[in-house]
Structures are given as structure tokens and as C-alpha cells.
Image (cartoon, coloured by chain):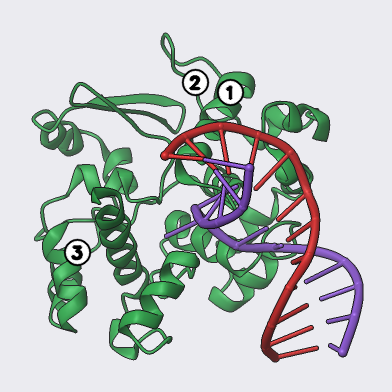
Chain colours: A green, B purple, C red
Amino acid sequence: MTSAKINIEATLFCGQSFAWTKCEGRYEAVIDRRLISFDEASFPALLESDPALQTYFDCSFDYAAAQQYLASCDEHLSQCIAAYPGIRILRQDPWETLISFILSQNNNIARIRGLYRTLSETYGTPVGKGHYSFPQAQQLLSVTEEDLRKIGAGFRAPYLIDAIKCHHILDEVADLDDSEAYKALMTIAGVGIKVASCTLLFAYGRFRLFPIDVWMKRILGQFYGGEVPPHFAPYEGLAQQYLFHYHRSEERRR
DNA sequence: GGCCAGGAGGCCT
DNA sequence: AGGCCTCATGGC
């Protein structure tokens, strides 16, 4: 395998996952109902010995080639990649990803992370001390809209209720092409083009999708004439993530 | 204290 | 089709 070195920090905190915490150099999350904990030094050996984590970090995809190609595309994208090289598109759990991005609408990342944790602590399963798995759809079947408003979901509460009811759609999506998968996901209340594309990119590895949020609108307008440039193909999703992380990081630095 | 946040739905032209 | 309004909530 000739994949580029994984940029753990950027990959886990570039806004595609809300599951991870970092404390004193240790990265921790409950992935697939299992507590995963490592630091920079222990990560390579852990990954080597753990097939499930290899899938999660999308190790069968040739990121070296994709990154090299994208860096050769245009000046600006090249700069974004140079600043944070080694970002991977994670293969996250579809259910967890769908709910996370329903929560993301008109919301900020810190708060999305908080809601994610509250849902886990309230309805998930304890995994070791102080850690909880993200609740599966089955664990949420009796939850009411009022319950969800109480923990701060706000106007997204009824969307979550509908997603819980329709969670079976996630199983069907795997067999659909991108445009059919969009349509299927968007039958769920509160799921539009942005939430659908994030779910398809960050859980199903649909690299051709390019989620457009308020940041990406600004970036496309400023650098690309308002359109997704054709030369991002066939790695649009990865290009998008490099752009998003670079500009968000630049903003926070000021 | 208004403004913004990885939007979507509804209503209005 | 496209443009505004509203939807909770918290951080700044």
C-alpha cells in the first residue's frame, strides 16, 4: 500500500466527524461500539493490527495518488493541501453520520459536537468509564420530540424523529447510484442536498460528491467563479474537504 | 446584544 | 425557478 501518511489531527477534526476528542495528546472516540484510544506514536501499530480501523480510515484507497493529482490541479488547492496534507475521508457509520449532519443545520461545530455527546450519554451504551456509544436507531425508537428539545436539539427535533422512523433508508442507499441515493435520503424530513451529500461522502465514500455549505459558497465564489471546477474530478469530495479545513483553520487563527 | 453557525422547508412572487 | 423568513440555541 502506497497511501500517503495519515494526518490524524486534520482528519479527525476537519468537520467530517463529531465523535472525537483530544486530551493530552490522546485521541478518543467510540467507533462501532468500541472505545478507540491512541496517540500519534501508538497509532501506526494500532492501525496495522486492526482491520476495522483500516476500513474506518479508508486504507484501501490510494490517497497518495489522489492528493498528488489534486495538488497539481490549481495553485490554491495546492496551498490548502500543503498546509494540512494527509486528510482522509472516513468511512463512518451511516446512521451516526446522518444524525450528525441533521444536527449540523444552522449550527456551529462546537455545538454539534456537544449535541452528539449528549445524545450518546443520554441514549447510548456505556463503553468503559465515561464513554458511550452513539445510540443506534433502535435505541431511540421511544424518544419523543419533547425529549430531544429538552437536550437542545431545537427545531431539529422533529427532523430527528422522522430520521429515526425512516432509518431503514440507509440500508437501501448502499445499492443506489449517487443521484438515486440523494433522492432516497431527501425523503427524510430535514434532509436536503447538503445533509444528503455529507452523509453519502462521509459514510459511504461517495467521492464524487461535493457538499456545499456557507463556507464552500464563499470559497467557490472567491477562487473558482462560483462553480465546482471540473478538474477536481474524480476526487471532488476530497478536494472539498481540503478547502473547507484550510479556510476554517485560517479563520480561527485570526 | 446583534450576529452567526457545515440548512431546510414553506411561502411568496 | 428564485428570493426571503423562520426555525432553537449558544458562543462570540
Amino acid under label 1?
A: Gly
Residue A156 falls left or right of residue B11: left
- Residue C4 position, x and y percent, is 73, 73
- Residue B4 position, x and y percent, is 51, 56
| Residue that badge 1 annotates | A124
Q: Which mark is residue A132?
A: 2
Q: Residue at x 82, y 30 (%)?
A: A146
Q: Nearer the viewer, residue A96 or A54?
A: A96
- Give the secondary structure at mark 1: loop
Q: Residue at x 35, y 69 (%)?
A: A240
| Residue that badge 3 annotates | A63
- Give the secondary structure at mark 3: helix
Residue A8 falls left or right of residue A245: left
Q: Which residue is drawn at 50% across and 46% down?
A: A108
Residue A171 falls left or right of residue A199: right
Picture layout, residue A120 above or below residue A71: above
User: Which of the 4 quarters of the picture holds residue A229?
Assistant: bottom left
